[in-house]
Amino acid sequence: MVKDLAKKIGCTPGSASIAIKRLGKGGLVLRERNEKDERIVTVTLSEGGKIASTRWRDDQKRSMALLFDSLGPNEKKTLKDLLAKALGNPSGTESGKESRFGSH
């Protein structure tokens, strides 16, 4: 639902709705109204949206790798620990899983 998506990304439902309409016009998302309650709209990525999302994630990973290539292992560990602390997760793990910043 648009309301849930807006809450998750930290914007108003109106702003989310505008963004979803634009993404829909670009063929990146699909909107489907609930038959029983037309106020409810389910938003999903289209195939084109899935491809664009995957490409974007891959580009971000490559950019981050290039950015941190100049750091040594100890510097990367220090950065990981500082970022985890700044994000309120001093253990460096996410819900019991290994951190996205790598292992110790």
Image: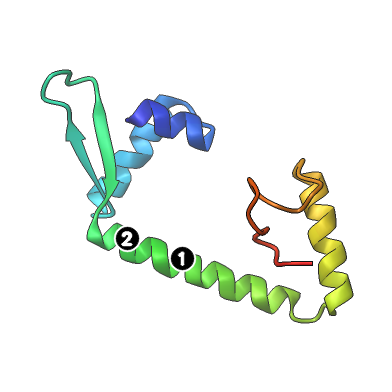
At 47% from the left and 26% from the top, the residue drawn is 12
What label sits on residue 56 in the rendered view?
1
How was this image coloured? Answer: rainbow
Amino acid type, residue under disc 2 in the picture:
Lys
Q: Secondary structure at mark 1?
A: helix
For the residue pair 28 and 72, the one nearer the viewer reads as 72
Please rate how many residues cluster around mark 1, counting C-alpha atoms within 10 Å: few if below 14, some from 14 to 19, many from 20: few
- In the displayed structure image, the side of residue 63 where residue 35 appears, left or right: left
For the residue pair 76 and 92, the one nearer the viewer reads as 92
At 82% from the left and 77% from the top, the residue drawn is 71
Tally of numbered tags: 2
Decide: is 50 above or below 68.
above
Percent across and percent down for residue 24 are 25, 47
At 32% from the left and 60% from the top, the residue drawn is 50
Amino acid type, residue under disc 1 in the picture:
Trp
User: Which residue bears the numbered disc 2?
Assistant: 50
Q: Image quadrant for the N terminus?
A: top left
Percent across and percent down for residue 18 are 35, 35
Extreme residue in the front direction: 96
Q: Secondary structure at mark 2?
A: helix
Please rate how many residues cluster around mark 2, counting C-alpha atoms within 10 Å: few if below 14, some from 14 to 19, many from 20: some
